[in-house]
Amino acid sequence: MSAPAGFEPIAEVTADERARIAFGRAGVRRNDRFLVSTRPTGEILLTPLASIPKRELLVWEDEQLRISLLRGLADVTQGRFARRDDLLGGDDEE
């Protein structure tokens, strides 16, 4: 059994009657997600994925926003923040 450069053969498997293949020996766990890619030669590549909600995609696409968010989280972790009651939506303006 041979494998492409950079890959290590783990086991030979057989698809079941529903064309499913077990990947437990390769370290795959329940609910893991993968991008499945194929080559014309029949090789299949599984690339691990982490799905995020679409509303959070902007953080990953905008580097400046991501840096600012991480800086803000670090500030809060270090206790560097100020309480802003006016942001709580109350109508108690004087």
Image (spheres, helix red, strand yellow):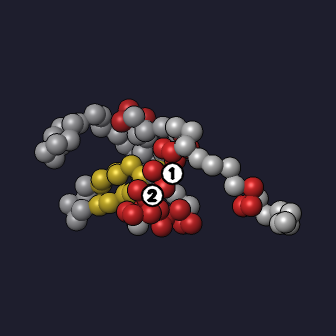
Q: Are marks 1 and 2 in contact (CB under 8 Å)?
A: yes
Q: What is the CA distance from the residue labelled 1 to the residue labelled 2?
A: 6 Å
User: Do we see residue 62 in this rendering?
Assistant: yes
Tell me the number on the disc at residue 68: 2
Name which residue lies at 13% across and 45% down: 5
Q: Amino acid at mark 1?
A: Gly
Q: Quadrant of the N terminus?
A: top left
**Total marks drawn?**
2
Horizontal relation, residue 91 to residue 21: left or right? right
In the rendered view of the protein, which quadrant contains the C terminus?
bottom right
- At which x and y percent is residue 61? 40, 66
Q: Which quadrant holds residue 41? A: bottom left
Task: Tell me residue 23's x, y (percent).
Answer: 41, 40
Q: Position of residue 87 (x, y in %)?
A: 72, 61
What is the residue that sits farthest to the front in this orientation?
94
- Residue 16 coordinates in the image, percent (x, y): 46, 46
Closer-to-camera residue (16/32): 32
Up the image or down, 92 lies above or below 11; here it is below
Q: As drawn, is 91 to the left or to the right of 22?
A: right
- Left or right: where 13 falls relative to 24: left
Residue beneath the point at 16% across and 42% down: 6
Q: Residues within 10 Å of mark 2 (few under 14, many from 20)?
A: few
Image vertical order of residue 35 relative to residue 29, above or below: below
In the image, 77 versus 27, the foreground residue is 77
> Which label belongs to residue 12?
none
Q: Amino acid at mark 2?
A: Ser
Q: Which residue is mark 1?
A: 72
Q: Relative to 79, is 87 above or below?
A: below
Q: Secondary structure at mark 2?
A: helix
Residue positioned 56% across, 66% down in the render:
55
